[in-house]
Image (cartoon, rainbow, N blue to C red):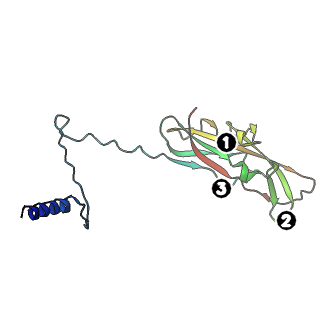
Amino acid sequence: MKKKALAAFLSLALLLALPLPASAAETTTQIYCTFSGFRTEAPPVTPAPAQPTYEVSIPAAYDTNTIPCLSITASNVDIGAGKLLTVSVDCEKTFDENGFFFLSNTERPNIKAICNLYRSDTYGTTGEWISSASTATVATFQNGATSPSSYGYLHADVSALDDTIDGTYTGTIYFQIELQDAP
């Protein structure tokens, strides 16, 4: 009898020691922790920084026969401290592969006139020639200022080529407006 009781006891011990398969719809663990002595209220939430806002005015048309230059202004510049808002000629889209900007005859688009672009900080003056991306900035604005801190005027000087004929010529200047860190 002792052998049977010992065998039953060992069998039961063996069954309890073996891992049992578990099947549960959800497995969760709750962890509890209590703090005391820190604070009784949550720290204040810092609001996300305000997004910069600005409104730049670039005329949609510029008639070189009646207007000496194109004025670039702003009616709202809320960009934050340490930032500059820059307006630049997009050289890739404005100039051809050789760095030239042409105006095309409206009736015969294959007839062209060459147009040199200049940036200036004085209304009506020619200023600096825009020849590459390094000279393409035509206006910069500081936070809160609606007048440019540098440049602000674009002057177009159109010249006839050997095959230029009488007529009206048009072209498109593309601009980039970017927010940059102030130097």
User: In x, y percent, where is residue 81?
Assistant: 48, 35
Quadrant (top left/top right/bottom left/bottom right) for the C terminus: top right
Viewer-side residue, 20 vs 109: 20
User: In x, y percent, where is residue 136?
Assistant: 70, 42
Viewer-side residue, 29 vs 54: 29
Is there any visible trace of residue 63 in the rendered image?
no
The residue located at (92%, 57%) in the rendering is 163
Q: In this view, does 1 lie to the left or right of 106?
A: left
Judged from this view, the residue extending furthest toward the right is 162
User: In x, y percent, where is residue 24?
Assistant: 25, 66
Q: How crowded is mark 3: few (under 14 residues within 10 Å), some or many (20 or more)?
A: few
Q: Is mark 3 on a helix, strand or loop?
A: loop
Figure check: 69 above or below 150: below
Quadrant (top left/top right/bottom left/bottom right) for the N terminus: bottom left
Q: Name the residue under label 3.
A: 60
Q: In this view, does 139 lie to the left or right of 157?
A: left
Q: In which quarter of the image is residue 167?
A: bottom right
Label 2 or label 1, whichever comes before in sequence order: 2
Viewer-side residue, 154 vs 14: 14
Give the Cα distance between marks 2 and 1: 31 Å
Q: Do the residues labelled 3 and 1 touch (CB within 8 Å)?
A: no
Q: Mark 2 points at which residue?
A: 108
Label placed on residue 138: 1
The residue located at (12%, 64%) in the rendering is 8
User: In x, y percent, where is residue 2?
Assistant: 7, 61
Judged from this view, the residue extending furthest toward the top is 183
Label 3 or label 2, whichever comes before in sequence order: 3
